[in-house]
Image (cartoon, grey):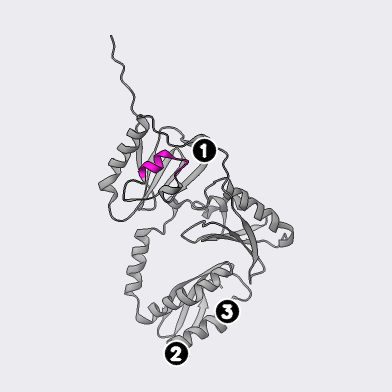
Amino acid sequence: MQKITKIMLKVTIKETQNPAIMKFEFPEFISRNQNFEFKNIDETAPSPLAKQLFYLPFVKTVYISGNFIAIEKFSIVEWNEVKELLAEQIETFVDKGGKILNIEESANKKVPVTVYSETTPNPSVMKFVASKMLTKTAVECKNIDETAAAPIAKELFSFPFVKEVFIDENYVSISKYDVAEWMEITQEIRSFIKMYIEEGKTVIDETQLVKTANHEKQQEEYFDKLDTTSQQIINILEEYVKPAVQSDGGNIAFQSFDEKEKRVKVVLQGACSGCPSSTFTLKNGIENMLKEMLHDQEIKVEAVNG
């Protein structure tokens, strides 16, 4: 009598642009219509497999989409130490009949969310604020070709009046063309964003983001190499300026400081980019603040994209 050999599941391990995240791909789709992100074990009701993975101390976040599971790790281990173990555990869990997703719990289940609109100092930009966090990393998309990390931005660009999209924390800032007025399109965009989030679609694909734990470490090293004045400027911008511009749907980032010319260059994003009042804010707000806090009346501030 011929012995029947059971075909075991085999997942494929693939690196991502984010060194903290590893993909584990299945030979077929495991989720066709929804994307899932679990940040802790309390959120894993729709996925028994994700719940099992969170018992491992190095697992930080679990993503499930299409034909893969992506896992973000804490820095306490290196991937070469644990990736094969993880793949084996996933294969064993599924081979023993464990469920990746509880379809009956996750299918067509909407996540209640509130989205409201806010005007910004920039008349071309409207801020849409959600009642949940959307991203830990700011993402700016000036055109559809820059939306690899922001699926929601890609869909927003299908609206003919959307010019640019900026996403940070719990809000989406949208810059429009002059072909439409906000009073005509605000409700349409607000409803779209609300429905998009409620359906569980991916707002930001963390696996595509370049700003990772490793990148942040490089940023820290970059900061340590800067001169004392540049470090002080960055700290002032982070503590006193960023919270204000973020509340207006924008962002500001330090680029450089020329000690000889006493010139500070910054990058404006979101509602701050192209804002008619940005020059006034830079000169009468940020520049005066730096002059006072650094005790140097010769300091000048300019935006490289303002």
| Residue at screen point 35% across, 30% down | 95
Report helix, strand or loop for mark 1: helix
Give percent across and percent down for residue 259: 40, 84
Of badges 1 and 3, nearer the viewer stands 1
Residue 96 falls in image quadrant: top left
Alpha carbon of mark 2 to alpha carbon of mark 3: how far? Answer: 19 Å
The span shown in magenta is: 44-53
Total tally of numbered discs in the picture: 3
Report helix, strand or loop for mark 2: loop
Label placed on residue 296: 2
Can you identify the residue that label 1 sits on? Answer: 105
Q: Residues within 10 Å of mark 2 (few under 14, many from 20)?
A: few
Give percent across and percent down for residue 60: 37, 52
Of badges 2 and 1, nearer the viewer stands 1
Q: Is residue 300 left or right of residue 185?
A: left
Q: In this rendering, is residue 289 above or below 244?
A: below
Whether the residues at callouts 2 and 1 have beta carbons within 8 Å, the answer is: no
**Label 2 sits on what residue type?**
Asp
Residue most extreme to the top: 1
Can you identify the residue that label 3 sits on? Answer: 281
What is the magenta segment's predominant secondary structure?
helix
N-terminal of the pair, mark 1 or mark 3, is 1
